[in-house]
Amino acid sequence: MLVAPSILSADFGNLKSEIEAICEAGCDLVHVDVMDGHFVPNLTIGPVVVKPVANIATKPLDIHLMVEDNNFFVDLFAPLKPKYISFHIESERHPDRLISKIASLGIEPAIVLNPHTPPQSIEYLIEKLSMVLLMSVNPGFGGQKFIPSVVKKAKVLKDMIEQINPNCLIEVDGGVSDKNINLLKDAGVDIVVAGSYVFGHKDGYKSAIDSLK
């Protein structure tokens, strides 16, 4: 299991030390939640903040766009050379075109599905994707409760991926902890995003990440 701590739950007053700490604690990716205040009811960070994060992090960036104008935000963040840029299928009219654009920039394209969106909605896009991110909370805020139905959804998606593009990974974001990690692993999930579980863990970041791995 790969672990991608979400810096949405980090202490932004000490962001440099927070990024260094999760990388030293053994995370695999640094998950960056970009929200525009329109697609979701929250406003987070832009490239001015994420650029120094990219410079500090010794692990690749995993940028999750929760925005209405995906094309605009891809152009903003592509120069930072993240490993992944993921966008919500619910907010994009031309997903095939955007996937090709992200790939042409040397970045691995990924699509995000909200809790209510069925995996079948992206069946014809899976062959071009490096990853599918399943939201296990409604997007917009950290610290929410895990939605159990995502486990069944991950199994359905895994079956589709194995038939179409076995190299495509499954990531789950929202309410992930040591209480549900085994269910996610058994469902075929490859990467988990963990924000409050990692940054709020009483025994420290390494203990949190190790417990998920």
Image: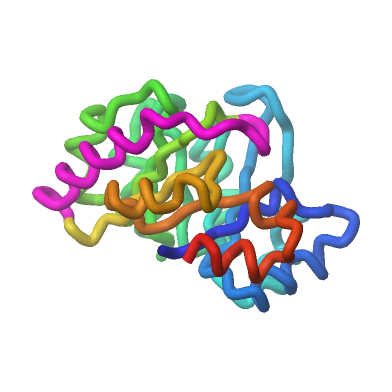
x, y percentage for residue 86?
A: 46, 46
In the rendered image, is residue 101 in sight? Answer: no
Q: Nearer the viewer, residue 115 or 213?
A: 213
Q: Is residue 12 visible?
A: yes
| Image coordinates for residue 96, horizontal then vertical, percent | 29, 39
Can you name the residue that lies furthest to the right here? 13
The single residue placed furthest to the left in the displayed view is 163
Picture coordinates of residue 49, whole percent (x, y): 77, 55
Q: Can you tell which quarter of the image residue 166 is in?
A: bottom left
Q: Nearer the viewer, residue 98 or 202?
A: 202
What segment carries the magenta color? 140-165
Magenta stretch: includes residue 152: yes
Q: Between 4 and 74, which is closer to the camera in this rendering?
A: 4
Above or below, 139 relative to 116? below
Q: Residue at horizontal 54%, vertical 39%?
A: 174
Q: Quadrant of the N terminus?
A: bottom left
* In the image: residue 46, left or right of residue 93: right
Instruction: Give how far across and how far down residue 128 sits, in percent.
Output: 24, 51
Assess whether residue 146 is covered by the magenta stretch: yes
- Magenta stretch: dominant secondary structure: helix
Q: Is residue 134 left or right of residue 188?
A: right
- Seen at 19% across and 36% down, the residue is 123
Identify the coloring.
rainbow
Quarter holding residue 37: top right
Q: How many badges with numbers are in the image?
A: 0
Residue found at x 63% / y 52%: 6
